[in-house]
């Protein structure tokens, strides 16, 4: 009789004591306990809001995922199948996640969650959001691409990758893509870009004003592509501050159209840990 690779793994799982979902009889180890053996491969941690996360090594690189996320559940289920050749039961998976969540919150270190930009020990890290989870490390001596940043980056499905940077092009090349009325306006945009790369605020708010057809939206997309490319480059004005906060959770930079023109005494809503850019719809 020919034995397939799946049959071999299944038999191996039986030898290791792989049992049914919640089965603790017959000398078999419950699936939940077998799943928990995977914790030796994980780096568990939590943030200051006591949310649980796991750093996993997969496809020759490290990734960070919330323990309760869909991506982590899929990876964990696949890891169980690779080890034991059978699917894990839903209850065993849920029980295992609860234990991992408890270990991450009560017995593991705390880290700050970073999106696109992070900072540590005076250095700045820019998440390239590529498939290898690489980041750019910026120090006082220069920059380099690192395979694993020492900060904990998280990603949303809407975040897009940045190209790996190259040396040799001066900042003035942006004049070819940005139409400003004066050199002072160009300096303001440059200062905003530098501020956007700071790990911590306060952050400036950039107002782009101009006649209809003056490429306000084009300039806005260009600036965002330099720092935080996203599937939704420009958003409409939020209805209230709650909508603004929801939009800011998964974005480093927010570009919004049809923002009310500035007037004395107007209180512009702002998110302290995100950049909010307003684009008036007309001059």
Image: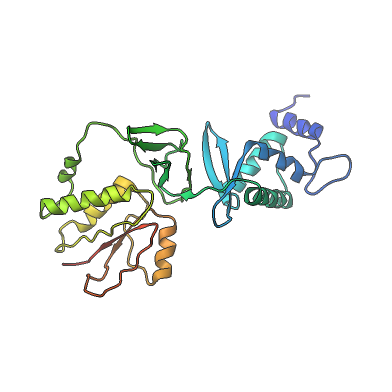
Residue drawn at (38%, 62%), measured in percent from left and top?
271
Q: What is the quadrant of the N terminus in the image?
A: top right
In the rendered image, residue 206, in percent from the top left (x then y), is placed at: 25, 58
Residue drawn at (19%, 53%), measured in percent from left and top?
188
Quick check: 223 left or right of 15? left
Q: What is the quadrant of the C terminus in the image?
A: bottom left
Quick check: 51 left or right of 5? left
Task: Identify the image's colour scheme: rainbow, by chain, secondary structure or one colour.
Answer: rainbow
Q: What number of labels is visible?
A: 0
Outermost residue toward the left in this view: 182
In the rendered image, residue 266, in percent from the top left (x then y), is placed at: 27, 74
In the rendered image, residue 242, in percent from the top left (x then y), is placed at: 43, 69
Which quarter of the figure has residue 127? top left
Outermost residue toward the bottom in this view: 265
In the rendered image, residue 248, in percent from the top left (x then y), is placed at: 41, 59
Quick check: 155 left or right of 194? right
Q: Is residue 101 above or below residue 143?
A: below
Outermost residue toward the right in this view: 26
Residue drawn at (73%, 52%), measured in percent from left and top?
91
Quick check: 99 left or right of 62? right
Q: Is residue 181 above or below residue 149?
A: below
């Amino acid at each position: 009789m020919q034995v397939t690779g799946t049959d071999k793994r299944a038999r191996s799982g039986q030898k290791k004591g792989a049992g049914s979902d919640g089965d603790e009889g017959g000398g078999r180890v419950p699936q939940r306990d077998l799943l928990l053996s995977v914790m030796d491969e994980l780096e568990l941690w939590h943030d200051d809001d006591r949310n649980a996360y796991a750093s996993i090594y997969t496809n020759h690189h490290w990734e960070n995922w919330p323990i309760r996320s869909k991506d982590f559940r899929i990876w964990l289920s696949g890891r169980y199948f690779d080890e034991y050749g059978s699917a894990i039961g839903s209850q065993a998976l849920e029980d295992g996640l609860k234990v991992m969540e408890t270990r991450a919150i009560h017995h593991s270190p705390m880290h700050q969650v970073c999106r696109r930009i992070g900072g540590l020990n005076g250095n700045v890290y820019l998440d390239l959001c590529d498939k290898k989870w690489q980041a750019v490390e910026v120090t006082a001596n220069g920059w380099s691409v690192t395979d694993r940043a020492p900060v904990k980056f998280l990603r949303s499905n809407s975040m897009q990758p940045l190209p790996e940077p190259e040396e040799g092009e001066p900042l003035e090349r942006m004049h070819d893509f940005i139409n400003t009325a004066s050199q002072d306006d160009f300096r303001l945009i440059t200062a905003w870009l530098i501020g956007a790369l700071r790990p911590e605020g306060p952050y400036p708010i950039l107002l782009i004003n101009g006649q209809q057809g003056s490429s306000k939206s084009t300039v806005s997309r260009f600036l965002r592509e330099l720092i935080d490319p996203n599937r939704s480059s420009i958003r409409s004005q939020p209805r209230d501050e709650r909508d603004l906060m929801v939009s800011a959770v998964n974005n480093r930079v927010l570009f919004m159209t049809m923002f009310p023109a500035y007037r004395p005494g107007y209180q512009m809503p702002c998110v302290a840990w995100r950049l909010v850019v307003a684009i008036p719809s007309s001059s």
